[in-house]
């Protein structure tokens, strides 16, 4: 599974060292594509929404990561003259 896009909208400042809750759900699935939505809350009785997010993911073949690794090895290779 790879990320096609990810959007995060911060609605309030996110405090450090404070327990948070993230809830996500699949909005749509079509073949190998997944659309997901999420919200981040304070872990408190008010459950104030701190951020919302949406993302699209695509399932890849089992050999995708090996092919990607080999491709990345060539990205920094010197140009042949």
Image (cartoon, rainbow, N blue to C red):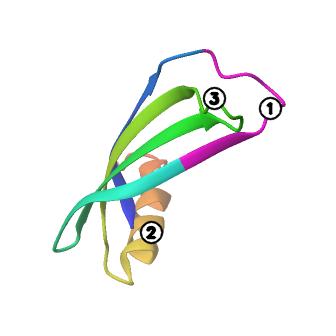
Residue under numbered circle 3: 46
- Tell me, yes or no, whether the highlighted magenta stretch contains residue 14: yes
Q: Residue furthest right?
A: 17
Residue ID at (31%, 80%): 61
Kindly report the secondary structure that dominates the magenta region of the rendered protein: loop
Residue 2 image label: none
Q: Between residues 50 and 70, which one lies in front from this camera angle?
A: 50
Residue ID at (45%, 76%): 66
Q: Residues within 10 Å of mark 2 (few under 14, many from 20)?
A: few
Residue 14 pos. (x, y %): 66, 22
Q: Is residue 27 above or below residue 60?
A: above
Left or right of 57? Residue 50 is: right
Q: Residues within 10 Å of mark 3 (few under 14, many from 20)?
A: few
Image quadrant holding the N terminus, namely bottom left
Q: CA distance from mark 1 to mark 2?
A: 41 Å
Q: Compare marks 1 and 3 and give the one earlier in the sequence.
A: 1
- Helix, strand or loop at label 1? It is loop
Segment tinted magenta in the rendering: 13-22
Residue 32 pos. (x, y %): 22, 72
Left or right of 46? Residue 36 is: left
Residue under numbered circle 1: 18
Q: CA distance from mark 1 to mark 3?
A: 14 Å
- Helix, strand or loop at label 3? It is loop
Residue 45 pos. (x, y %): 68, 34
Residue under numbered circle 2: 70
């Amino acid at each position: 599974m790879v990320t096609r896009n990810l959007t995060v909208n911060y609605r309030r400042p996110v405090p450090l060292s404070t327990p948070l809750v993230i809830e996500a759900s699949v909005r749509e699935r079509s073949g190998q594509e997944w659309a997901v939505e999420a919200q981040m809350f304070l872990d408190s009785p008010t459950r104030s929404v701190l951020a919302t997010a949406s993302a699209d993911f695509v399932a890849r073949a089992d050999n995708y990561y090996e092919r990607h690794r080999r491709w990345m090895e060539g990205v920094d290779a010197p140009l042949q003259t």
